[in-house]
């Protein structure tokens, strides 16, 4: 409902309006002009610190045709190693722990955890990605995390001591439903790990394209602590990561089970300063304007100079990038991606087709808008083998830069 915080029920106020976009990750098989778009408006709740999307779509609208596959990137492997270290060093998991991941996608994180714990189990609604998990040897329930799946898991009589909800907790308009499910499965001393993009990082970097319909909440430490406390849990620890353009891991347990780390206390003080006088929101709006102007200047001048422009990476955030910058197939001839679930499909509304790297190599282009800018280091490292010499790579975020191959 408009103006009502979906975490605490207080009144919210508008922070930014990014216009409208078709639901992210829903690629089409053919070109169309008539596709539904939905508003992307970000609201803030002064009571609980909840930053949230005003218009939420149902899960059927979002995930029926889901195409995201966790990539096999070096940066993700390092990220998993870091998480593992935190979990092991703080005894949050042990060889006796039964682990569960909600929204386990293709099972890569659980595959990583598996040698260090007693058991792993994944839950993911998308059959096409869950099939990959099974190939990796990760047992996966293909379903939404709902009352019936909770019952199914409880019937398995596992003593679940660790539940991960990575990049999914903010993807549901009713987080309480997920939390109640987690609470009923987790054992008394159990640990939950909620990982999401970090609201402060998104705002600070101006990464407006992290705002899309799947991301319904943008959690800060303040907000997550308020939320967990309202459920009689502590926020015990946090960690930061560069993945997905700036993420945070929140580690929580039932009240007074474990200590609250200095990192949490320190970050709460830092955040207080950011939110004071709306400083962080003003910075965000300025940065978004700047990124839009610089990126469009670059694209438009190359377009007028008869350069062929393509995009690299078809992640969910590319939907917001294309719609907010009003880029379509007249300027962006095609978008390159490695995911077999996307190649051959078309972005709705902008009608930008998705092609493979092999196909790109046989075509002509001079400028590449890197929509997967969060993999900047990986992309620059392989750029000489991937792109033609003298190609201009345009990274819109987190600092607008160009790079000549
Ligand atoms: Zn609230």
Image (cartoon, grey):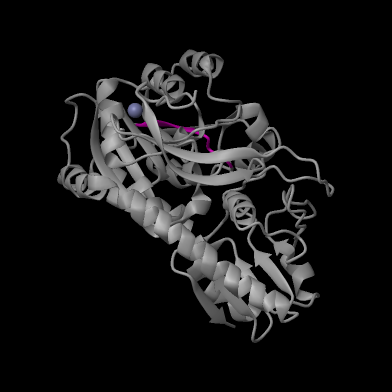
Using residue 282 as the reference point, say whether residue 36 is left or right of it: right
Note whether 101 is above or below 270 in the view shown: above
Image check: 272 left or right of 174? left
Q: Quadrant of ligand 1?
A: top left
| Magenta region includes residue 101 | yes
Q: Is residue 3 above or below residue 35?
A: above
Using the image as rendered, state which of residue 343 and residue 139 is in the foreground: 343
Q: Position of residue 392 (x, y in %)?
A: 61, 79
Q: Position of residue 169 (x, y in %)?
A: 45, 33
| Image quarter of the C terminus | bottom right
Q: Residue drawn 72% across and 67% down?
A: 357
274 vs 108, nearest the viewer: 274
Quarter occupied by residue 251: top left
Q: Is residue 256 above or below residue 26?
A: above
Q: Is residue 127 left or right of residue 405?
A: right
Residue 309's x, y, as percent?
70, 72
Give the number of callouts.
0
In this rendering, the answer to whether 89 lies above or below 150 is: below
Which residue is found at the position 50% from the left and 68% from the top? 376
Q: Is residue 189 visible?
A: no
The answer to if 347 sits in the magenta stretch is: no
Camera-nearest residue between 384 and 219: 219
Please state if 310 lies on the left or on the right of 13 as rendered: right
Res 180 visible: yes
Q: Which residues are magenta?
A: 97-105
């Amino acid at each position: 409902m408009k103006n009502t915080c979906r975490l605490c029920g207080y009144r919210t106020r508008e922070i930014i309006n990014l216009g409208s976009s078709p639901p992210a990750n829903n690629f089409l098989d053919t070109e169309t002009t008539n596709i539904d778009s939905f508003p992307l408006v970000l609201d803030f709740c002064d009571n609980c610190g909840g930053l949230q999307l005003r218009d939420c779509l149902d899960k059927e609208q979002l995930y029926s045709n889901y195409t995201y596959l966790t990539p096999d990137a070096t940066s993700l492997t390092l990220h998993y190693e870091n998480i593992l270290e935190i979990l092991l060093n703080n005894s949050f998991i042990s060889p006796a722990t039964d682990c569960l991941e909600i929204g386990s996608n293709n099972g890569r994180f659980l595959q990583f955890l598996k040698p260090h714990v007693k058991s792993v189990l994944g839950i993911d609604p998308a059959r096409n990605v869950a099939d990959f998990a099974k190939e990796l040897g990760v047992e996966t329930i293909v379903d939404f995390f709902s009352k019936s799946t909770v019952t199914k898991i409880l019937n398995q009589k596992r003593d679940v001591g660790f539940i991960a909800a990575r990049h999914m907790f903010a993807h549901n308009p009713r987080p309480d439903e997920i939390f109640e499910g987690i609470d009923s499965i987790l054992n008394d001393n159990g640990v939950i790990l909620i990982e999401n993009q970090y609201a402060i990082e998104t705002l600070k970097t101006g990464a407006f394209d992290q705002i899309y319909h799947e991301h319904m909440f943008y959690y800060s430490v303040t907000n997550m602590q308020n939320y967990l406390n309202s459920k009689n849990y502590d926020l015990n620890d946090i960690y930061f990561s560069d993945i997905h353009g700036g993420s945070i891991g929140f580690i929580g347990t039932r009240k007074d089970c474990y200590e609250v780390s200095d990192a949490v206390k320190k970050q709460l003080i830092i955040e207080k300063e950011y939110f004071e006088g709306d400083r962080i929101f003003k910075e965000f709006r300025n940065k978004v304007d700047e990124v839009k102007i610089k990126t469009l200047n670059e694209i438009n001048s190359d377009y007028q100079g008869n350069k062929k422009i393509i995009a690299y990476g078809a992640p969910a955030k590319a939907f917001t990038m294309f719609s907010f910058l009003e880029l379509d197939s007249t300027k962006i001839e095609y978008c390159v991606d490695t995911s077999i679930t996307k190649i051959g499909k078309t972005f709705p509304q902008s009608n930008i087709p998705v092609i493979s790297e092999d196909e790109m190599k046989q075509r002509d282009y001079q400028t590449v808008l890197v929509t997967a800018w969060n993999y900047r280091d990986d992309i620059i490292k392989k750029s000489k083998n991937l792109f033609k010499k003298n190609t201009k790579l345009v990274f819109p975020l987190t600092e607008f830069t160009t790079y000549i191959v």
